[in-house]
Image (spheres, rainbow, N blue to C red):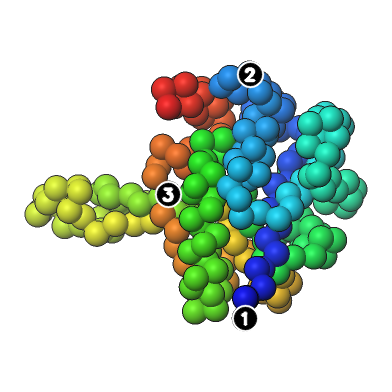
Amino acid sequence: MTAVKPRIAALMPMRHNSERVPGKNYRAFGDGLPLFHHTLDVLLASGRVDVVVIDTDSPTIKEQCAEKYPDVIVLDRPSHLLGGMTPMNDILIHDVETVEADFYLQTHSTNPLLKPETVAKAIDTFLANYPIYDTLFSVTKVQTRFYDSLARAINHNPNILIRTQDLPPFYEENSCLYIFGKETLLKDHTRIGRRPFMFEIDRHEAVDIDEEIDFRVAEEIFRLR
């Protein structure tokens, strides 16, 4: 008997205004396409996503989706969820209560260097390991010498300088991918559950655009790639 394929909805919330990089979500990136088109195309090309959901207050994004991506579900962000201080989990709760799916993958338009095969591998990894791992989030491995605010060494002995590549790794949450079920989000108000799988992504692919310098760095990597 063939198993029923779980329905996967990809969530990509976007605001119209951005404080540090004005209009970054729809600003031309790399080859001239608006930034969010790059990540949206990656999701659609992954072959694992059944529907893409964009939650936004942006008339520009809504118009472009209606013109080029008519199959994408565009949700109008409610007024009580507008503003830069609104917790992302509150927006995600609104989205999962509106669009039904077995599991949800959340990413950001500001991760334009993600590859379709990475998205596919993340979903396959999650499904192969569920429910042993109840959620998945992407990380970047970091091997360098860390200190706390009191200049105390965290992950090394300053008197024994081993090579940084031999240090025990730390893992940075890079905000590229989160996979979770509705129950986890509604019950615990978090997209990272109690038994999460850390999915490693190369740091060059995981570049996140938060400031103007990030935009320029991501564009240069995009062109070189």
* Crowd rating for badge 1 (residues with CA inside 10 Å; few <14, some 14–19, many 20+): few
SS under mark 2: loop
Please state which of the two labelled residues, at mark 2 or mark 1, is closer to the viewer: 1
Q: Give the mark nearest the N terminus, 3 or 1.
A: 1
Q: Indicate the quadrant where residue 18 lies.
A: top right
Q: Give the percent coordinates (x, y) of residue 46.
A: 58, 47
Tell me the residue that label 2 is attached to: 32
| Outermost residue, front side | 1
SS under mark 1: loop
Residue at the image position 83 percent from the left and 51 percent from the top: 81
Q: Amino acid at mark 1?
A: Met
Residue 82 can be seen in this image: no
Depth check: 114 or 176 in front? Answer: 114
Q: Indicate the quadrant where residue 95 lies.
A: bottom right
Q: Give the percent coordinates (x, y) of residue 143.
A: 28, 50
* Crowd rating for badge 3 (residues with CA inside 10 Å; few <14, some 14–19, many 20+): some
Q: Give the mark nearest the N terminus, 3 or 2.
A: 2
Tell me the residue that label 1 is attached to: 1
Depth check: 74 or 80 in front? Answer: 74
Dot 3 and dot 2 residues touching (CB under 8 Å) = no
Tell me the residue that label 3 is attached to: 201
Q: Amino acid at mark 2?
A: Gly
Would residue 111 be found to the left or right of residue 82 on screen? left
How many badges with numbers are in the image?
3
State the CA–CA distance, disc 3 to disc 2. 25 Å
Q: For the N terminus, give its image quadrant.
A: bottom right
Residue at the image position 65 percent from the left and 29 percent from the top: 35
State the CA–CA distance, disc 2 to disc 1. 47 Å
Q: For the C terminus, give its image quadrant.
A: top left
Above or below for 73 versus 221: below
Please state which of the two labelled residues, at mark 3 or mark 1, is closer to the viewer: 1
* Crowd rating for badge 2 (residues with CA inside 10 Å; few <14, some 14–19, many 20+): few
